[in-house]
Image: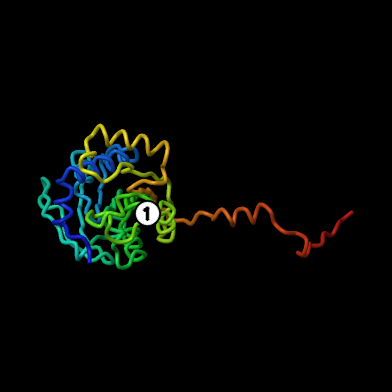
Amino acid sequence: MRESAESLESFYASPLGLMARDMALRRLRTLWPDLAGCNALGFGYTAPILTAYRKSANRIVLVNPRGQGAIAHRSSRGVMACVADEGLLPFSDATFDRVLCVHAVEEADDLPGLLRELWRVTQPEGRIVVIAAGRAGLWARMDHLPFGAGRPFSRNQLRARLISAGFHPTVGSGALYGPPLARLSGRKFAHGFERFGETVWPGFAGLVMVEAVKRLYVEPDRLEVAKVRAPLFGTSAQPSVERTE
């Protein structure tokens, strides 16, 4: 059973939740400084992060998976949130320029199906960012926190999942290097832990983040490229060449 939208909203109103939002948004803005002219989809519980782009984006739609519930977040166009099955999103193909997933993949019943559906609604050359609890970090080990629910991931595991769904990963990052303690959730402490963690122990992030792009063609695997560059000629037949005088 997924974490409810009510419990997630309560967490993000707490000092720890505010720190988690700020540190995740800090890393996301290095990839997406703004969403000017973009149609953006947030799948999972993305409101604390994605609504920071409300002024620049053309349109933002928040979708909560069934079982999580939804909070009726509003924009100038009305309610911007809805509930949908993770394998059947109510949108046409190639609808969104940007897709953000938070509190989504860890508890997905059918993760390959979810990622394929997100691939379907993403425009060609559109970009997706998946943020998930880090397998090696401290936050995934705290059962009382939302990041302790479901399956945590390493950065390579997320990359592999996205590749299987047809995305091409471009860059990965991490956030939340500090301990999940409310007394250390102030801005000064948080930024200090982030700078230290990014430099000294990048593999121990509480959150892992991977950006990928939707490509309509398949890029060659590095192993296949290596095979072509170093072919084995010893046992293969050589074509005969007839010379003409």
- Residue 210: percent from left, percent from top: 38, 49
* Residue corresponding to mark 1: 135
Q: Note whether 226 is above or below 235 in the view shown.
A: above
**Nearer to the camera, 161 or 82:** 161
- Identify the residue at image location x=40%, y=53%: 154
| Residue drawn at x 20%, y 53% as measured from the top left | 62
On the image, the x and y values in percent for residue 146 come to: 23, 55
Residue 121 screen position, x and y as percent: 30, 58
Which residue is found at the position 21% from the left and 36% from the top?
186
Q: Residue furthest right?
A: 245
Between 45 and 189, the one nearer to me in the picture: 189
Quarter of the figure with residue 115: bottom left
Q: In this image, 111 relative to 89: left or right?
A: right
Q: Quadrant of the C terminus?
A: bottom right
Residue kind at label 1, given as amino acid type: Arg
In the image, residue 215 sits, relative to residue 187, either above or below, namely below
Residue 139 as seen in the image, left or right of residue 15? right
Where residue 113 sits, quadrant-wise, is: bottom left
Q: Quadrant of residue 45?
A: bottom left
